[in-house]
């Protein structure tokens, strides 16, 4: 994907906000049928953003964009972990 740095920053911010909204809508600690649908979208979003961060691109990214991308991936990783723990503790 060839994106300008400002476009890529918009993708990162949108992805982070979307991940937070998906976690809040998923009823993670009270598992329902929609929990798995929201979880699938959340994991797919995390996979896409990980691919975007670690894909090989010819032009180098600015340092501020790398720091932002790493911070967003850390937040999304925490959200996915929280989602998985919520579903796992429901079945305990």
Image (spheres, rainbow, N blue to C red):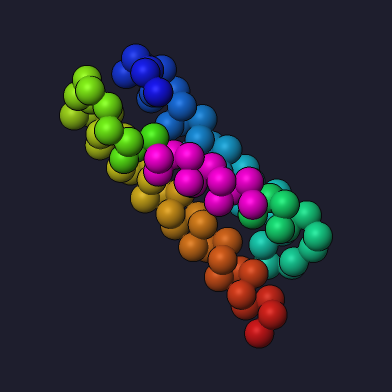
How far from the left and from the top, in percent, is residue 92? 66, 85
As drawn, 73 above or below 82: above
How far from the left and from the top, in percent, is residue 88? 61, 75
Q: Quadrant of residue 50?
A: top left
**Residue drawn at the location 43% of the way across and 32% of the way down:** 12
**Residue drawn at the location 69% of the way across and 80% of the way down:** 91
Whether residue 43 appears in magenta in the rendering, the answer is: yes
Magenta stretch mostly in which secondary structure? helix
| Left or right relative to 65: residue 1 | right
User: In terms of depth relative to the viewer, which is nearer, 29 or 33?
Assistant: 33
Residue at the far right in the pictured view:
33
Question: Which quadrant does the N terminus fall into?
Answer: top left
| Magenta region, residue range | 40-51
**Residue drawn at the location 62% of the way across and 77% of the way down:** 89
Is residue 92 among the parts visible in the rendering?
A: yes
Whether residue 22 appears in magenta in the rendering, the answer is: no
Residue at the far bottom in the pictured view:
92
């Amino acid at each position: 994907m060839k994106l300008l740095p400002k476009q890529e920053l918009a993708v990162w911010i949108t992805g982070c906000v979307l991940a937070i909204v998906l976690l809040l809508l998923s009823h993670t600690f009270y598992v329902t049928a929609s929990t798995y649908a929201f979880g699938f979208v959340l994991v797919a979003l995390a996979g896409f953003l990980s691919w975007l961060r670690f894909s090989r691109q010819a032009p180098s990214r600015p340092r501020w964009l790398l720091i932002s991308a790493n911070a967003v991936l850390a937040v999304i990783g925490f959200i996915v972990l929280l989602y998985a723990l919520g579903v796992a503790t429901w079945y305990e």
